Image (cartoon, coloured by chain):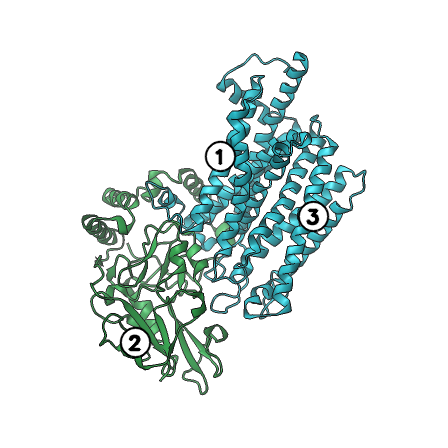
Amino acid sequence: MTTNPHTGFIAFVSDCARWALSGGTGFKIYLAALFSLMGAGAFAYSQQFQTGLIATGMSNIVSWGLYISNFTFFVGVAAAAVMLILPAYILKDKDLHKVVIIGEGVAVGALIMCLMFITADMGGPLKVWHMIPGIGLFNWPSSILTWDMIVLNGYLALNAIVPLYILYCNYHNRPPVDWKYRPFVFLSIFWAVSIHMVTAFLYEGLPARPFWNNPLLGPRFLASAFAAGPAVIMLVLIAIKQNTDHVVDTKIFSKLQRIIVVSAVINLVMLFSEVFKEFYAFTHHSLSAQYLFFGLDGHSSLVPWIWTAISLNILGTLLFAFAPSKWSPRYLMVAAISLFSGIWIEKGFGLIIPGFVPSPMGEVVDYVPSSVEILITLGVLATGAFVVTMLIRPALAIDKQYKKYQETVG
Amino acid sequence: MTVREKKEGPMKTEDILDTKSTRRDFMKSLSITAAAGSAGLVTGGCVGKGSTEEMGLKWEEYFKKNYRLMTQQEKDDTVTRLERLAKIQHDLDIQVSDQEPREQVLFGYAFNISRCKGYMDCVEACVQENNLDRNSKTQYIRIFELNPGQLDPTSGDGKYHHEVPVEDKFYMGVQCFHCENAPCIKACPTKATWREPDGIVVVDYDWCIGCRYCMAACPYWGRRFNWGQPEVPKEEINLKQHYLGNRLRMKGVMEKCTFCIQRTRQGKLPACADACPTGSRVFGNLLDPNSEIRFVLKNKKVFRFKEELGTDPKFWYFMD
């Protein structure tokens, strides 16, 4: 693959597809596992489509559940690509520049999951066109949900088109033209912050829900995202390092580790501040927090989850903060997985469900996701993993080929 | 050709996965996934003779506009289609009104907490009048039983099931408060819910995409979602309907109290006020200086629920 006889868009697409799909037995098993999860998810969705959202565990009191929880978390993962883009392009960090494309691939996968979760949560998915400006009615700027649609789709476009352009140029053995893509890179930096702030505003802007109606929510979303997102990217990099001949510089891991530690510590400080506010002077508005952390009126389904989340959160932060200078990939993996899952629980259903409990009329119910809901969620997660895999494999192949070309040319 | 049979309680999800595992159903499910978005699905598929007309009607219904953007002609057309569809599908002779708000009318409601005895006749009347789903036991009105010393329904019991009145208890009814500054309207991404000129906050059921953001935004728990297909026994269906009111809803859409728009725009009282045996419910035109509601607001000490949120509800509580 040192020389590339093909040119043009069709050759680019077919080569990318080949690089994306060809692989050894291990890779085939991995793909088969993803496909079966995706199939199970599609089947579960067909059930939900027929019977309605009654197939889920949601109710008039807890009216958002697993879907919106995961949506919220993965918006953060998508936004975290900025933690690679910013140092790479603004601080001119050469090491992180090498893995920017991985971050962007993860962002695209995360955004596709977000859009799928939103669709799965909708009562009338066939009526989505009602939201499209022009043919439908778009309640902008009043509804924050319309803002969220704009920023999510815009960010998806930015994170898909910029890497596509760069890879397309590299595929044809030429460097990308700076002025053609750099403006979009800088735009995507602001955009990344905005996707997560706007998603926080969805909740923050509701005085009806005191648990969410809290100015710290947006900043806290960013801090947790900039810890969990790079942790996901780190897991992907470890997978690449272990399973391919692609070289991932250890310096990259150290830099990611530093980003994670700073963000995770800020996140914990803000968590502590929230807990202090809720419990030092307990008010009527602290009932949701009590439900989450200690249980309320005999309902305590979230209590084990939130304490697990906080333990994992602290464990992950400590593991990253006090990592030995000669860490093994396995060490980083444990650290990344614990931090990632801690934030996933805490910011997913640990944030969404207590917003609804107690209800505005003071009623307390527990929410338990149904098997249909869980299967659909797993299907979406598998789709996300599939998308990330399909994007990163050709990207790495093109990168490798382009490097070889540069070496031969001089 | 009857309204769906009543199920025995809501189906559990495990049941759905287990009981429908025959090959035919499996294929049906798969094809539905595959066909999502296609015209066949939109129109509900082709079933036997006489369905061509039904398919055509459903097709036109699918592509109709938001109610507020319709011309009078388009409103009349969709009403005709809905009436015809009810005839074809369920052999029902419904009359759907698209009556406009009347000039110089702004509806308001007042609730006398010293008179209400918690009989819940209002709840029953509301369920009957508004064709509320019997499967999920949907209620627009909730009555909370409170102990003296409280004036906040959130501390009361909204599920009491015993003989009333009870010594030393009092009762507070809540429903949609038709706020002037309604958070639900602000939240809706598709403008499927809005405040009519006579103050009624309505939902265009056909335009609602079922995202439930309005539900999260409402500080009064005033909205109800159709998690499954709502069901009303055929003989109990109220045939006098309004496009923005009690017409039969479908799964996946939001609904709420409309101050019985189908009645009140004709000058009648809402079903709840009509049914109340104690005279606790006062409904009327806030712009009419001689109305009872204006008398209450002027002469009684009134208060509103969660006033600090600035939603400006048009629903007041008062005491004798």
Q: Are marks 1 and 3 in contact (CB under 8 Å)?
A: no
For discs 2 and 3, the disc positioned in front in the rendered view: 2
Say which chain tag 1 marks: A
Residue farthest bottom in this picture = B167
- Is residue B277 in sight in this rendering? no
- Is residue B134 in sight in this rendering? yes
Quick one: label 3, few (<14), some, or many (20+) residues within 10 Å?
Answer: many
Q: Which chain is green?
A: B
Residue B233: x %, y % from top left: 32, 63
Mark 3 — residue?
Answer: A338
- Disc 3 residue type (three-letter): Ser
The N terminus of chain A is located in which quarter?
A: top right
Marked residue nearer the N-terminal end (1 or 3): 1
Mark 1 — residue?
Answer: A157
Say which chain tag 2 marks: B
Do marks 1 and 3 share a subunit?
yes
Do marks 2 and 3 share a subunit?
no
The residue at the point 59 percent across, 43 percent down is A77
Residue placed most toward the observer, A213 or B85 = A213
- Disc 1 residue type (three-letter): Ala
The residue at the point 72 percent across, 45 percent down is A335
The residue at the point 62 percent across, 52 percent down is A345
Write down the colour of chain A: cyan
Quick one: label 2, few (<14), some, or many (20+) residues within 10 Å?
Answer: many
Residue B164: x %, y % from top left: 41, 83
What secondary structure is marked by label 1?
A: helix
